[in-house]
Amino acid sequence: MKSKQLNFFITPKDWEAISVFLSENQIKVLVDESLNGDYENDGKLPNEDDEIYQVFLTRKEFLSDIKINTTDTNKIRYYSITLSPLLEFSMGGFYPYNKNILQRARFYFKSGYYNEQDIYVNKADEFTNWAQEVMKQFKKKFLISYPKQKDFLYSHSAIDWIEAQNAKYTNGGQGWEKPINKIDNKKH
């Protein structure tokens, strides 16, 4: 399957401005939790307290083409990124299990898939062009290069956090980790 992605670092401080960007561009924000009735989606990115770190972006015109899957065992519903006109946005930030690591964010979409007859089907050009344009405009508005690590792009707040925390690049590009201060337990 052909796909495109953009990997970058942002912090939750950026999420409000990103929500404005999404709203101004009439981009719909969907979360898996809304399919199960656990999250009221108001068209903006979830709050950091919601502990939702992945959303799906689309346009009103594409909503009728979105496919929803259900797991066999526990009947959990989720969006099919493979079959649907969805731009996956993994928001990165600080996950609850370790607030000392700034996790990488990413945009990702599949531009086609193999159908049940094993024939490759391209997604509509309207969707793939739109998804590429969203990534292009997002990159232009929010991201810059960081001279200390050139594999990814960064928001200003991500660079500020990395510098302020003296964070180290870790896990093959998955994140930046703030050093843990060890207390000297020697008796004086």
Image (spheres, rainbow, N blue to C red):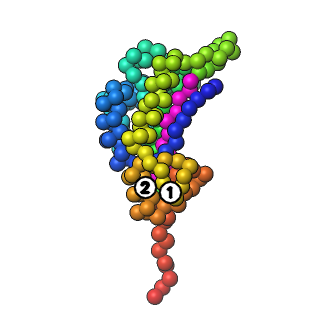
**Contact check, label 2 and label 1, Cβ < 8 Å:** no
**Magenta segment: does it hold 50?**
no
**Residue 78 screen position, x and y as percent:** 49, 25
Image disc number at residue 147:
1
Where, by quadrant of the figure, is residue 28 drawn? top left
Which residue, as the protein is rendered here, is positioned at the far bottom? 188
Q: Residues within 10 Å of mark 2 (few under 14, many from 20)?
A: many
Residue drawn at the location 50% of the way across and 82% of the way down: 186
Image disc number at residue 2:
none
In the rendered image, which residue does mark 2 sit on? Answer: 159
Where, by quadrant of the figure, is residue 3 drawn? top right
* Residue 165 vs residue 184, the one in the foreground: 165
Can see residue 36?
no
Q: Is residue 163 above or below residue 32?
A: below
Specify the amino acid type for callout 2: Ile
Q: Is residue 44 above or below residue 167?
A: above
Can see residue 91?
yes
Specify the amino acid type for callout 1: Pro
**Residue 173 screen position, x and y as percent:** 57, 50
